[in-house]
Image (cartoon, rainbow, N blue to C red):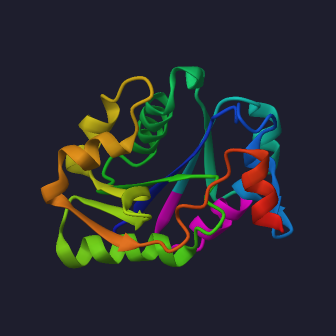
């Protein structure tokens, strides 16, 4: 049995600066969320959990593939940490023996299957516990964590995200290049730039 990788897609935010659910913005004849799901679902031996929150019904309508499990985070307003915890808890409930998990967001339009595969192969090659994507001199999502960090992830609070753990365990972190990873959609302007 090949070792499976969990991919948790965080899609619970309310896109306050954008004024409409960014998960549903159309992009490449699909939506930002569907694009992320379709790239993730091409990864071999991966299981996908999508965490919804704000605009739950609209967002869940977008998820038409049977390859994903959707979980609602009623505490989404308390910040990203609650969605990380909710997604990881659901993943561990479904696959208690899972060894590693990638966290991705749905507003990085240039995320590809290759990025996810690079995270996994870098982890397999180096045995480092954390593999992050690097862009614009920062380390960020998508990011892979070995199970030894699952408790740390479950203990995040409020607005804290995975970056807190990356920074805390820099000596166990390696990175892969994600050239356009810095492009994410937070405002109308970001989106117009993307589609132009």
Q: Is residue 149 visible?
A: yes
Q: Is residue 46 left or right of residue 186?
A: left
Q: How many marks?
A: 0
The C terminus is located in which quarter?
bottom right
Residue 25 image point, x, y percent: 81, 52
Quarter of the rendering occupied by the N terminus: bottom left
Residue occupying the point 86% across, 68% down:
29
Position of 25 relative to 85 (above/below): below
Residue 138 found in image quarter: bottom left
Find residue 94 and report its image quarter: top left
Q: Picture coordinates of residue 119 (x, y %)?
A: 37, 70
Q: Please tell me which residue lies in front, 162 or 92.
A: 162
Using the image as rendered, state which of residue 99 and residue 31 is in the foreground. Answer: 31
Q: Residue at x 43, y 23 (%)?
A: 158
In the image, which residues are magenta? 34-47
Q: Nearer the viewer, residue 138 or 120?
A: 138
Above or below, 2 against 131 in this view is below
Q: Verify whether residue 129 appears in magenta.
A: no
Do we see residue 1 in this rendering?
no
Drawn side of residue 117 relative to residue 50, left or right = left
- Identify the residue at the far left of this view: 171
Left or right of residue 192: residue 136: left
User: Does the magenta-highlighted stretch encompass residue 45?
Assistant: yes
Image spot of residue 192 (x, y percent):
82, 58
In the image, residue 73 lies at what x, y percent? 58, 28
């Amino acid at each position: 049995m090949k070792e499976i990788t969990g991919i948790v897609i965080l899609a619970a935010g309310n896109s306050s600066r954008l004024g409409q659910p960014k998960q549903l913005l159309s992009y490449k004849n699909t939506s930002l969320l569907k694009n992320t799901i379709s790239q993730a679902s091409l990864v071999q031996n991966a299981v996908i959990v999508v965490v919804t929150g704000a605009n739950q019904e609209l967002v869940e309508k977008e998820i038409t593939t049977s390859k994903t499990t959707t979980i609602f985070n009623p505490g989404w307003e308390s910040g990203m940490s609650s969605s990380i915890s909710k997604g990881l808890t659901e993943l561990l409930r479904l696959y208690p023996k899972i060894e590693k998990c990638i966290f991705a967001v749905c507003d990085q339009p240039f995320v590809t299957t290759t990025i996810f595969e690079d995270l996994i192969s870098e982890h397999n090659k180096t045995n480092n516990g954390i593999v992050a994507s690097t862009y614009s001199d920062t380390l960020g999502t998508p990011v892979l964590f070995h199970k030894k960090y699952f408790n740390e992830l479950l203990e995040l609070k409020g607005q804290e995200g995975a970056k807190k753990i990356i920074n805390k365990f820099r000596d166990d972190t390696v990175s892969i290049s994600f050239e356009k990873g810095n492009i994410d959609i937070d405002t109308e302007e970001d989106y117009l730039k993307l589609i132009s």
